[in-house]
Image (cartoon, grey):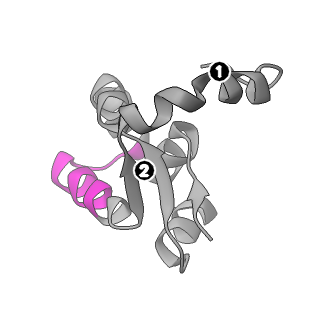
Amino acid sequence: MNIILDSNLFFSALIKDSITRKIILEYEGLFLFPSYIFIEIQNHKKELLEKSGMFEYEFTRLIRLLLLKIVIVPHEVLVPFKEKAVEIVKDIDLE
């Protein structure tokens, strides 16, 4: 089974050596993630580095390791499903 991963969970795995990171790294399936992950990482890189306490080379290495378990889904594939996705999460989190 493939699971859709949101940026909050990915960031959690980057910041702390936690159960979230362990699940991502040890899960037998793959995680799906929208292609904007790279924009999100760049936008929050300084904050993520500070919170993680890692050096930049360690941080980059961890990102690469996590990305081995993630299939990046191009934006064009997701566009037709945006309206339905917003409807599903409208009471939870629209960001």
Question: Which disc number belongs to residue 74?
Answer: none
Residue 53 in picture, x, y percent from top left:
36, 46
**Residue, far left:** 57
Eye-nearest disc, 2 or 1: 1
Q: Position of residue 3 (x, y in %)?
A: 60, 59
Q: Using the image, determine if residue 37 lies above or below residue 58.
A: above
User: For mark 2, does the 10 Å Cα neighbourhood hold few (<14), some (14 to 19), or many (20 or more) residues?
Assistant: many
Going by the numbered disc 1, the residue's amino acid type is Glu
Can residue 15 be seen in this snapshot?
A: no
Name the residue at 51% across, 60% down.
31
The first of marks 2 and 1 along the sequence is 2
Q: What residue sits 34% from the left and 59% below the top?
A: 67
Pointer 1 residue: 83
Classify mark 1: residues with Cα within 10 Å, few (<14), some (14-19) or many (20+).
Answer: few
Q: Secondary structure at mark 2?
A: helix
Q: Is residue 3 left or right of residue 60?
A: right
Name the residue: 22% across, 60% down.
61
The answer to whether 79 appears left or right of 86 in the picture is: left
Q: Is residue 55 magenta?
A: yes
Q: Nearer the viewer, residue 36 or 75?
A: 75
Reply above or below: 4 against 79: below
The residues bearing labels 2 and 1 have C-alpha atoms spaced at a distance of 29 Å
Q: Which residues are magenta?
A: 52-64
Q: Main secondary structure of the magenta part?
A: helix
Residue 56 lies in the magenta stretch: yes
Amino acid under label 2?
Answer: Leu
| Residue occupying image coordinates x 35% and y 40% | 74
The reply to whether the C-beta atoms of the residues labelled 2 and 1 are less than 8 Å apart is no
Mark 2 lies on residue:
14
